[in-house]
Image (cartoon, rainbow, N blue to C red):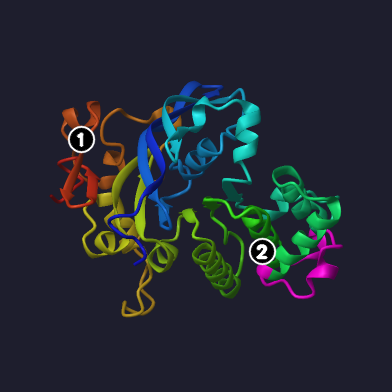
């Protein structure tokens, strides 16, 4: 584990709430979410699709779709500076320079009509005092750093000429070009085959160590969490229901949702040709969320009315291990 008890906090998210205006009215996508990312640490956000992981990332970058999405409460502190107080122009200087983001689908993140080298060079031109020629040379250097062969010629190609794994390496090169303090990786291995996934995650981890950056890694894959993260937050229906070191979470999962996620992982020592364990039902729609325990309707256990009406407290059960303490869904 790379996490150290004395590590300084780089990013602090405090009581973050986000709402979206929909055809069904105002709905809440994040409900008072709080987490920290220490310097040099990899923090994982894990949960099913629709739990609020990507909304958390886009909130930190202040890239929520406007005017539908808006932050209604909270603070996002990068080295004690509240990003929510910055002007649009000031935030542009933070993106790419102090915070880099690796988007989920590289084909959508890259401009299809611009050459790869020009897109990376643009990052240097925006954030560093360099000439176009220097920016072009730096772009080629970044392609080499992320393991793309023949980088000078690849820089002259367009996104559609590269494989999915190569495009993801380009997106990583863009995110890390200015050696940001924080890297947000939003499911960086989506739609890649297993071998390429491992290569991309190894690359990201090696570059993170080399540059001393912190990483906020968003994924639905607990195997990725186990291999790469120091700390982990489990998200469900817009809330963090459990937060701990990766080792503590895997050794002693407390919330029923966390236990369900872990139970759904295929095991090498499991019974052959047996059905995989699943969590019944799906994540509720934003318009159907209750104020109390949101996992109640999928837990398969009867909940008293009080647990559905009032939000369970967030308790520290052991040092550094926090859980949303629904009396039915937690084993404290």
- Answer with left or right where residue 38 lies relative to residue 61: left
Residue 169 numbered tag: 2
Residue at image position (84%, 51%) is 132
Specify start and end residues of the magenta stretch as a single range: 145-163
- 153 sits left or right of 19 in the view: right
Foreground residue, 79 or 118?
A: 79
Instruction: Report whether residue 114 is seen.
Output: no
- Give the spatial CA distance, label 2 vs label 1: 41 Å
Q: Position of residue 319 (x, y in %)?
A: 18, 52
Residue 267 located within the stretch drawn in magenta: no
Q: Is residue 155 left or right of residue 302?
A: right
Quadrant of the snapshot with the N terminus: bottom left
Going from the N terminus, do you reach mark 2 or mark 1 first? 2
Locate residue 51, reporting x and y percent: 43, 42
In the image, is residue 25 above or below residue 236? Answer: above
**Residue for badge 1:** 313
Using a 10 Å C-alpha cutoff, classify the residue at mark 2 as few (fewer than 14 neighbours), some (14 to 19) or many (20 or more): many
Element under label 2? helix
Q: Residue at x 18, y 28 (%)?
A: 305
Residue at the outermost front position: 129
Sort mark 1 into few (<14), some (14-19) or many (20+) by Cα contacts within 10 Å: few
């Amino acid at each position: 584990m790379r996490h150290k008890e004395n590590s300084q906090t780089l990013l602090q998210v405090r009581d973050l709430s986000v709402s979206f205006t929909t055809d069904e009215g105002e709905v809440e996508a994040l409900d008072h979410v709080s987490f920290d990312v220490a310097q040099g640490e990899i923090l994982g956000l894990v949960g099913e699709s629709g739990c609020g992981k990507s909304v958390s990332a886009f909130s930190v970058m202040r890239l929520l779709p406007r005017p539908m999405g808006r932050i209604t409460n909270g603070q996002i502190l990068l080295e004690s500076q509240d990003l929510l107080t910055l002007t649009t122009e000031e935030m542009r200087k933070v993106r790419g320079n102090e915070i880099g983001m690796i988007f989920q689908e590289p084909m959508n993140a890259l401009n299809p009509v611009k050459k790869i080298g020009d897109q990376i060079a643009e990052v240097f031109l925006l954030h560093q005092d360099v000439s176009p020629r220097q920016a072009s040379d730096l772009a080629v250097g970044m392609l080499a750093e992320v393991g793309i062969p023949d980088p000078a010629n690849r820089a002259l190609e367009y996104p559609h000429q590269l494989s999915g794994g190569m495009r993801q390496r380009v997106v990583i090169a863009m995110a890390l070009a200015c050696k940001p303090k924080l890297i947000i990786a939003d499911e960086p291995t989506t739609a890649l085959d297993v071998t390429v996934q491992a290569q991309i995650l190894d690359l990201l981890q090696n570059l993170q160590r080399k540059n001393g950056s912190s990483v906020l890694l968003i994924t639905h894959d607990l195997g990725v969490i186990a291999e790469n993260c120091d700390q982990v937050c489990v998200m469900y229906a817009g809330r963090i229901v459990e937060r701990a070191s990766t080792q503590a979470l895997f050794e002693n999962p407390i919330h029923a949702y966390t236990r369900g996620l872990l139970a759904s992982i295929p095991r090498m020592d499991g019974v052959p040709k047996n059905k995989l364990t699943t969590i019944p039902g799906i994540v509720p729609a934003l318009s159907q969320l209750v104020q109390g325990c949101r996992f109640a309707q999928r837990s398969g256990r009867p909940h008293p009315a009080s647990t559905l009406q009032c939000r369970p407290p967030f308790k520290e059960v052991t040092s550094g291990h926090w859980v949303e303490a629904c009396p039915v869904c937690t084993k404290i």
